[in-house]
Amino acid sequence: RKEVEQDPGPFNVPEGATVAFNCTYSNSASQSFFWYRQDCRKEPKLLMSVYSSGNEDGRFTAQLNRASQYISLLIRDSKLSDSATYLCVVNVYGNEKLTFGTGTRLTIIP
Amino acid sequence: GAVVSQHPSWVICKSGTSVKIECRSLDFQATTMFWYRQFPKQSLMLMATSNEGSKATYEQGVEKDKFLINHASLTLSTLTVTSAHPEDSSFYICSAGDRGRGQPQHFGDGTRLSIL
């Protein structure tokens, strides 16, 4: 079983819609969680950290469910510029080492 | 602005050539840097952890004699792909951690390596 699993998509969503991604992780001792965004042929960029209490940044909401070992990302009022691959990232060991999911590809359609 | 600089951005070379990629932290000291490889439509796979002043730690299945890592200073790590072959063609990305900035790692722009 992969340490971090995501639905690869693609998700094709009309502009203005709400879209949600889930991600599951296998190690219950995982320390911290993040969503990164990666555009085609570019490096990943941190979108947001994910906290147990849930956190929101503008149109983006991230949630963590430790009991079920999953992380979610919700994007409201999607924009064309949201088209990208969204990577679920887990810090398993509490050091700086990160484990990446395969990513979920999102395309926003005009 | 960029806090991790990676060079070169794109390399095309013949099979058998050795290629060196540099990763620099621009305004912070990085005792640890990471090297990843990403094949098309796949996720980032950690190749090795580069430790300043000591040997790199390689992930299982990564040949340390093929992918030479040197981390001689707190701001520079290099990855050398020795005797590169077409199957080594990939997107190589480095990252460096700077906990003081509140995020786990900063990524370089990546190096697209194409071996003919």
Image: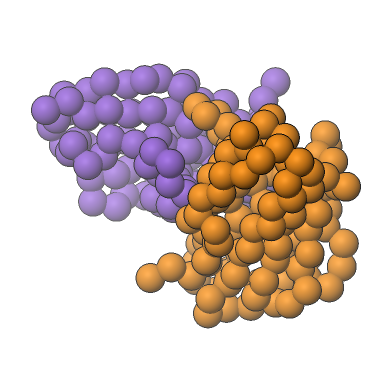
Chain colours: A purple, B orange
**Left or right of A6, for residue B13:** right
Q: Give x and y (percent) for residue B52.
A: 78, 71
Using the rendered view, name the quadrant where residue B69 is placed.
bottom right
Q: Give x and y (percent) for residue A21.
A: 39, 28
Residue lying at 22% horizontally and 42% vertically, measured from the top left: A81
Residue lying at 69% horizontally and 52% vertically, measured from the top left: B19
A18 versus A35 height, above or below: above
Q: Give x and y (percent) for residue B92.
A: 60, 46
* Foreground of the two, B110 or B114: B114
* Foreground of the two, B116 or A15: B116
Q: Give x and y (percent) for residue B57.
A: 83, 53
State which quarter of the image contains the N terminus of chain B. bottom left
A3 versus B55 height, above or below: above
Residue lying at 70% horizontally and 20% vertically, measured from the top left: A1
Residue lying at 17% horizontally and 38% vertically, measured from the top left: A79
| Number of numbered discs on residues | 0
* Foreground of the two, A99 or A33: A99
Q: Is residue A29 visible?
A: no
State which quarter of the image contains the C terminus of chain B. top right
